[in-house]
Structures are given as C-alpha cells and as structure tokens.
Image (cartoon, coloured by chain):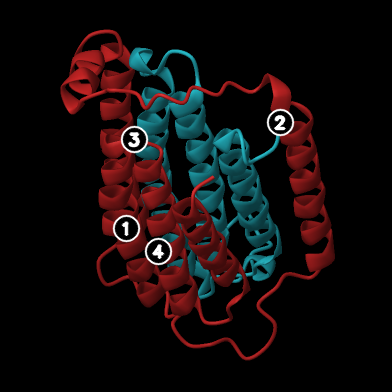
Chain colours: A cyan, B red
Amino acid sequence: MNAATNPLIGYLLVAALLFAIGLAGALTRRNAILVLIGIELMLNAANLNLIAFWRYGPHPEALTGMMFAIFSIAVAAAEAAVGLGLVISIHRHAHTTDLDAMNRMKG
Amino acid sequence: MSFVFYVLAALSVAGALAAVLLKNTVHCALAVTIAFAGIALLFLQLDAQFAGFAQILIYIGAVAILVVFAILLTRGSETPKGTVYSHFPLVGLLTAAAIFAVLGWAVLSSAPMLPNESAPPTVAVIDIGNALMGRYVLPLEIVALLLTAALIGAVIVAMHEKAGAQ
C-alpha cells in the first residue's frame, strides 16, 4: 500500500518532516525566540498526526484524537505565553536573546 | 492523494523551512505564520473544521502576534551580523535528520497496518461541545486552570520587578 491508496501516509510523512524541521530549528538556532518557534512547529506536527489519525481511524465519532489536538493547542498556547515572557525577562537582565551567551543560572 | 494536499503540504513545509533558515527574526516569524496557516488548511482538508479554525484563531491570531511582540520587545528585529546558528549546528541537523529517518521508516514500514476509513466523519461542533462538557469536562477544567496560571505567570515573569529599577 502506498501513498496513492492511503492518504494517511502522506499526512504522517508531512508531520514527520515538519517535526524534523522544527527540531533542527530548536537545536541549531541561537535566538531564544526562534528556538520557541521550532518547539511550536514540533507541537503542530504532533497535532497534525493526531488529527490525521482521528480522520482515518476507525471511530471518529468518539472524538478522541480531536480532543487530544484541541487540548494540545491550548497547552501549546500557554507554553508560548510563558516561554516568550521568560525570553523578555532574560533580555531585561542579560540584554541578549542569544542562547550561547546565557551561561549563568544566577542573573 | 489530492492535488490540494500536495499544495498545502508544500506550503507548510516551505514555511517551516523558511522559519528555520532565514536570518532576520521578523521574517522567521512571518514564515512560521505561513506554516501555521498551511497546517490549519491541512486540518480543514482532514474534515476537522473545529480544530482548523481553532488553529487559525490561536496560532495565527495569538501565538504569531505574541512572537512578533517578543521580537520587537527584545530588539531582535535587526538582521544579526554574524552567524545565526549555534556553535555545533551539525549535531542538531544530524539529530533532526536521524529522527526524520526513524519516523519515516516507521510510517512506511507500518503502512499496510494503518487505518484507512474513506468515509468522512460527520461530527458537528455541537458534538464537540457535548463531549467537552461531558466526557472531557475534567481535562477542560484542568486546561482552564493551566491557562489561568500561565497567564498570571507570564505577566509576573515579564513584568518589571521594581518600577524604575533600570
């Protein structure tokens, strides 16, 4: 069975690619905000997996994957708010968002 | 696979790649907005209207604006002079490539066992509301508490500790 017969495979591969891109961004960028963007991309890729399995799974009326994705979106929004607040706070103390320059635990 | 899927997948992946590769932070934020929009349209393509519109509202409407605000508040809008990558970018790239290889191998090797329901689900927003108020009411309350705590925490963390201390 290939992607032409089962569309779920295409969605899963796209989600895997988005996850890998987000991970590469989170691991290689210097700017803390771009690391957060990479984490958001990874969360979005996971949501795409959840929705794709909900759509092509056997019991979509149970709404399990949909609910998981909705709660995941809410948690990701909370994470983004706190993460960006932390970045702004660190910038106020250290005057940089460069992660390689943040080598002290104590401000 | 429909033509629309390939267009949306290419849009999402191109936005994500641009967000990771571009030098200017503001350009990265705009590129990631395109990726979020592509993913929202993929949700709509998957007959998940509620999740798609929630994605548009939350990610494009809130998270992208929050990212742009954070970039402007940290004066990150200028293009950096030197490199934008960390000291060992190859390690991160290799890790990401290895993860993608493992995930792709897992998907392709389990392809015959994957579910394939062709009939689109007939789920209305009222069903989602009933599920949220019925079976999923405890997670809903926990998420409400989490969002309240995150809101207060973000304000406290980003707030000036002492007025006029700077």
Q: Is the Cβ of the residue at disc 4 closer than 8 Å to that at disc 1?
A: yes
Where does label 1 land, which residue? B60
The quadrant where residue A88 appears = bottom left
User: Residue A55, relative to residue A48: is it above or below?
Assistant: above
Q: How far is mark 4 from mark 3, CA to CA?
A: 20 Å
Pair 1/3: label in front: 3
Does the image show residue B114?
yes
Q: Earlier in the sequence, mark 4 or mark 1?
A: 4
Q: Is the Cβ of the residue at disc 4 closer than 8 Å to that at disc 2?
A: no
Give a yes or no on whether discs 4 and 2 share a subunit. Answer: no
User: Residue A33, relative to residue A3: is it above or below?
Assistant: below
Q: Is the Cβ of the residue at disc 1 closer than 8 Å to that at disc 3?
A: no
Protein chain holding label 3: B
Pair 3/2: label in front: 2
Where does label 4 land, which residue? B33
**Disc 2 marks which amino acid?**
Met
**Disc 4 marks which amino acid?**
Thr
User: Residue B84, relative to residue B106: is it above or below?
Assistant: below
Residue B141 percent location from the top left of the image:
26, 20
